[in-house]
């Protein structure tokens, strides 16, 4: 684990009432009534693997300065450590049930063969041979380009598990469908990189900003901010559905593992653990697909979302 601490001062526009130049003696509301300076204290925790995150949570000591450590008070902390290490088998079964209808509707994909020249085998290119080229034999191999559709062979996903407490019951629907999507993408020749995020702020200002993905991001200005980022899956790693099921679709990943790590931070950072969920500033960095924090907002139809993402990736479905 690596922790980056920083302090920043940001100038922001504060809404309020200002004098109305068109109506002497009157005021009008303005989104930028005055400029104020806000101070931020930031802790960013970086993990290079899921195993690193689980082991850090297991070693995180009880914080003697904080008596309300929820990671030990709600749910089963020891069970969360076990599931983090060995995976959530029951969750994986439920996720396979989510993925099955999609598998039944997928069209078979083929990859476009691409020619290349080698030192032996295949058909000979007489021109290259007579010119003395050592690589004069024409062969074919699978390319990185699909035979149809606008798509990428390498798909980067960023998932923010930060959520309001009242949305805990909806964690599986959201995370479970994401797990199913990853399994489906890999089965169709894509290679997925997956990063897990968390974010929370205490005594700060939150702004809703539309990111490059077109989604609304909850970004913090000022206050005490804590962020977590961990790589759950590299592009060359196979899908471990049991581990992904717990990391993405079980509420105790956040409440047990991540909270345990954040609670062990020094003051004032541990006090932000249970505060307002926010999106890290680098959530969209190089990501093709993002899922933002959940804050008392409507949860989309995740089955429709999975189908749309697959379609956007050039994956076709058979007619229903």
Image: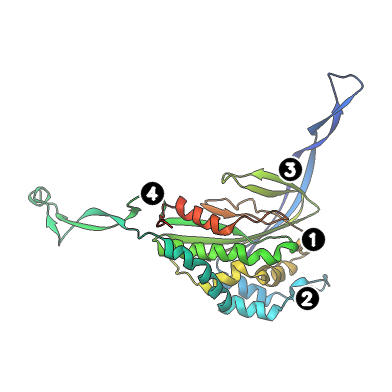
Farthest front residue in view = 320
Q: Which residue matches tag 3?
A: 10
C-alpha span from label 1 to label 4:
50 Å
Lower sequence index among marks 3 and 1: 3
Which quarter of the rendering shows the N terminus?
bottom right
Residue at left offset 69%, top offset 49%? 219
Q: Which residue matches tag 4?
A: 149
Placement of 295 over or under 98, stated as above or below: above
Q: Which residue matches tag 2?
A: 73
User: Within 10 Å of the Cα at label 1, are there few (<14), some (14-19), or many (20+) other Cα atoms?
Assistant: some
User: Front-most of 238 and 57?
Assistant: 238
Residue at left offset 55%, top offset 62%? 178
Lower sequence index among marks 2 and 4: 2
Closer to viewer: mark 1 or mark 4: 4
User: Front-most of 63 and 303?
Assistant: 303
Q: Which residue matches tag 1?
A: 268
Secondary structure of the residue carrying tag 2 is helix
C-alpha span from label 2 to label 3:
36 Å
């Amino acid at each position: 684990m690596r922790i980056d601490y920083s302090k920043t001062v940001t100038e922001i526009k504060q809404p309020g009432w200002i004098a109305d130049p068109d109506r002497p003696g009157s005021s009008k509301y303005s989104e930028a009534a005055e400029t104020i300076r806000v101070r931020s204290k930031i802790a960013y925790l970086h993990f290079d693997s899921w195993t690193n995150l689980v082991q850090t949570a297991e070693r995180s000591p009880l914080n003697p300065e904080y008596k309300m450590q929820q990671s030990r008070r709600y749910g089963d902390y020891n069970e969360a450590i076990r599931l983090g290490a060995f995976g959530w088998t029951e969750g994986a079964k439920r996720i396979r049930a989510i993925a099955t209808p999609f598998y039944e509707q997928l069209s078979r994909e083929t990859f476009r063969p691409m020619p290349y020249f080698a030192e032996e085998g295949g058909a000979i290119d007489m021109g290259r041979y007579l010119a003395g080229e050592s690589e004069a034999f024409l062969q074919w191999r699978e390319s990185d380009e699909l035979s149809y559709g606008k798509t990428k062979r390498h798909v980067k996903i960023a998932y923010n598990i930060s959520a309001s407490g009242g949305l805990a019951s909806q964690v599986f629907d959201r995370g479970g469908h994401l797990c199913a999507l990853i399994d489906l993408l890999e089965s169709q020749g894509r290679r997925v990189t997956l990063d897990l995020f968390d974010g929370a702020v205490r005594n700060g200002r939150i702004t809703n900003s539309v990111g490059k993905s077109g989604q609304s991001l909850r970004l913090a200005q000022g206050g005490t901010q804590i962020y977590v980022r961990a790589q759950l899956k590299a592009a060359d790693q196979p899908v471990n559905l049991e581990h992904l099921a717990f990391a993405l679709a079980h509420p105790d990943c956040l409440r047990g593992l991540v909270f345990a790590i954040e609670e062990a931070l020094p003051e004032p950072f541990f006090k932000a653990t249970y505060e307002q969920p926010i999106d890290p500033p680098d959530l969209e960095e190089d990501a093709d697909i993002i899922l933002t924090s959940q804050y008392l907002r409507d949860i989309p139809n995740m089955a429709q979302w999975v189908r749309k993402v697959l379609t956007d990736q050039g994956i076709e479905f058979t007619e229903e």
